[in-house]
Image (cartoon, rainbow, N blue to C red):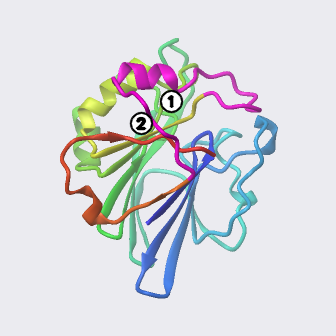
Amino acid sequence: MQIVWKGQACFFLAASRGKQEQVRIVIDPYEESIGLKPPQVEADMVLVTHDHFDHNNAKAVRGEPMVISGPGEYELKGVFIKGIASWHDNAEGKDRGKNTMYVIEAEGLRLCHLGDIGQDELSAEQVGQIGNVDILFIPVGGTYTVAAKGAAKIISQIEPRMVIPMHYALPRLKVKLEPVDEFLKTMGVKNVEPQAKLSLKAKDFSVEEMKVVVLTP
């Protein structure tokens, strides 16, 4: 599986289906008004965690993708998606509405994208619905979502094998968020070398120790 971060909460995933075919997934494509260039990719599936302009620009994705925008169970070309209800509320106490967390099963891997999760912690029911996770995409920039400490708490609940932080301050990004450094400090992670993309297989997760990976958009 290939994983590319496009900035904010947007990721491009390419899961192999046999030797010749890939299933391409875009999560949370954004509008250009946030200061970043929208992802110029073609996809089979678009996942939208909530209806805010920095997450819901499905029309920017080329092709005729299946668009998923809420809780439920979905399947396309051997890729299974579970949408789990959650809340966009944050530490400031602002009610920002509903948010959908997605669990993606493909290539023998389980990925979980938390969208703009703002809850102080997940409920026991939510943790049970999420289940075992190989790769967790979690916001860490605060303001609209959990910040470093809140993210660390949710990570301890889910116990993924790999964590990829998202939704934090970037050059040109007009949304004011905290940098990723505070999250890395909270997690006790040092000397992280950011990567442009990841290429992973299920066999790469034989080591039990959790790993934090920082991607560059």
The residue sitting at 57% across, 23% down in the picture is 179
Q: Which mark is residue 209?
A: none
| Residue 123 seen in the figure | no
**The magenta segment:** 169-196
- Residue linked to disc 2: 86
Which amino acid type is shown beneath numbered disc 1?
A: His
- Residue linked to disc 1: 88
Give 188 or 119, whichever is nearer the viewer.
188
User: Is 133 inside the magenta-drawn segment?
Assistant: no
Give 169 or 142, whichever is nearer the viewer.
169
The quarter in which the N terminus is drawn is bottom left
The residue sitting at 29% across, 47% down in the picture is 130
User: Is 182 inside the magenta-drawn segment?
Assistant: yes
Main SS, magenta region, reads loop
Q: From the viewer's perspective, is 144 left or right of 75? A: right
In the rendered image, residue 45, in percent from the top left (x then y), is placed at: 56, 66
